[in-house]
Image (cartoon, rainbow, N blue to C red):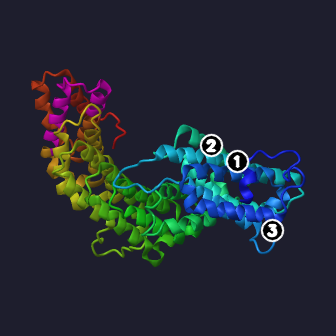
Amino acid sequence: MELDGARKTPSREGPFLSGGWPPTALGQAFSQVLHRLTGQEAQRGDARGAVLQDVSAIIEAAECDKLFEGSGAPFREMPEMLGEVAKALGMYAAPPREKEGRSDGHSEVAEKAEQVGLLFLKLLGKVEAAKNSLVCPAWKTGLHHLAGPIYIFAIMHSLKQPWTSPRSQDVAGEVLALLLQVTDCDSVARFLHGGNEDEKGRFTVIMGLLKPELNKESWKNNPATKHVFSWTLQQVTRPWLNQYLEKILPPSLLISDDYQTENKILGVHCLHHIVLNVPAADLLQYNRAQVLYHAIFNHLYTLEHHLIQAVLLCLLDLFPILEKAVQWKGGAARPTTHCDEVLQLVLTYMEPEHRLLLRRTYARNLPAFVRRLGILTVRHLKRLERVIIGYLEVYDGPEEEARLKILETLKLLIQHTWPRVSCRLVVLLKALLKLICDVARDQSLTPEPVKTALLQEATDCLILLDHCSQGRVKGLLAKSLQSCKDSKVVNCIRKVQQVSEGAPYDGT
């Protein structure tokens, strides 16, 4: 084969140093390498090493002007050929499809990635040399075809994943750094979206390369593709992201609609990024916002707390966009909103929930719903009351995250719906006093700062209750103060009385 000589170190008298290969021979060499990379030969270990050695020898031997200029008929232009070789090298180093949750062969993938990364460093070094020499203007065309495949390879192997190793990550990181240097980009974001109107970004090119692997039939063939897409998407923000909406929305919805929780979370994160960085007008067009809402809302029926957390955060940022399309004309009752619908479902799940991680997740996001609805929270007051009282009764572990968030929710509830709270005064007062007594007598491993925070939050709620009930709490606590002997409980009651008697309080 004509490439046999490429596997040996070239001598000084060889054709490499005496002017390099003629363009037709160089094109033929790359064409044969491409055929070997995409054929069955690349699957054999001995042939694999030989192919990579041939590619390395060709890159080292070729001169810049021959490497990036056209190779003439009957071969394709060299820049396009280089791009195809870069794609083949990237696919060669890609992780295989995982079968039934198994992930065999990851060490072999990391070894391949290291070898391919070194080849890309050599190739980008040639581009850098051509760029600095000023005698080979065709390097820009070559870089145009190389940038996309090399970027995908670099991101695929620079992120910490099961198929990467510290060494392969380092090599891929070097490839990405050199790629940014050659393209005169100070960040990945600029590489993707461009710096100004005259400098076009490469996001469209990247998405074009990823598109064949991001359809319903093929997106799981390469487990790295979804991570490359997600990470790349996160780098593009306002005001650039909206121009790519048609390219990024379908894959994000596809990934989020998977049966695996890991993929659902990844897809929801992609959708959340779109919600945050695409103008509301673009999301409302063609009913896209409603499509997003229904796709995300369906995940609320799961029992995975990580997914619930991602879904609730995304929905809370989506509500303002959805409500832009709803106009209240006054007179009649305000229509229920998507926020009402979600809160109703969340409270339905919260009330009987006994899993601590899910309880904490729900409680963590509950204050945001009360802030969002404001006075309209009265629609959910009965169920909120039951949830608050039920959660205040249950110990939540050393950090007491659930009970602290429930107390924050109660404070907001009193502030926003105080006219309706007075009729529930006795029930809420008993729940708060019981909490204060339980915390004061707690002998568990709960840290003292956490106990102090619980007592302070409960005291703040009592003060707010007293204000909205015109001092009734102060009168009801007077008898308790006489009979109580616990110093912590007495201290909380006295704080309520002191503030009620006229001392300033910033909680109201």
Q: Measuring 33% from the left and 55% from the top, which residue is drawn there?
A: 100
Residue 450 in magenta stretch:
yes
Q: Name the residue rendered at 30%, 35% in the picture.
A: 502
Question: Secondary structure beneath disc 1?
Answer: helix
Residue under numbered circle 3: 70
- Distance from label 1 to label 2 (Cα)? 9 Å
| Residue 471 coordinates in the image, percent (x, y) | 20, 41
- Which of 262/352 is in front? 262
**Disc 2 designates what residue?**
171
Q: Which residues are magenta?
A: 428-456
Residue 472, how many percent across, how many down?
A: 17, 42
User: Going 70% across and 47% down the picture, which residue do you hit?
Assistant: 121
Q: Quadrant of residue 263?
A: bottom left
Give the residue pinned by disc 1: 121
Q: Is residue 125 left or right of residue 86?
A: right
Q: Secondary structure at mark 3?
A: loop
In the depicted structure, whether residue 436 falls above or below residue 9: above
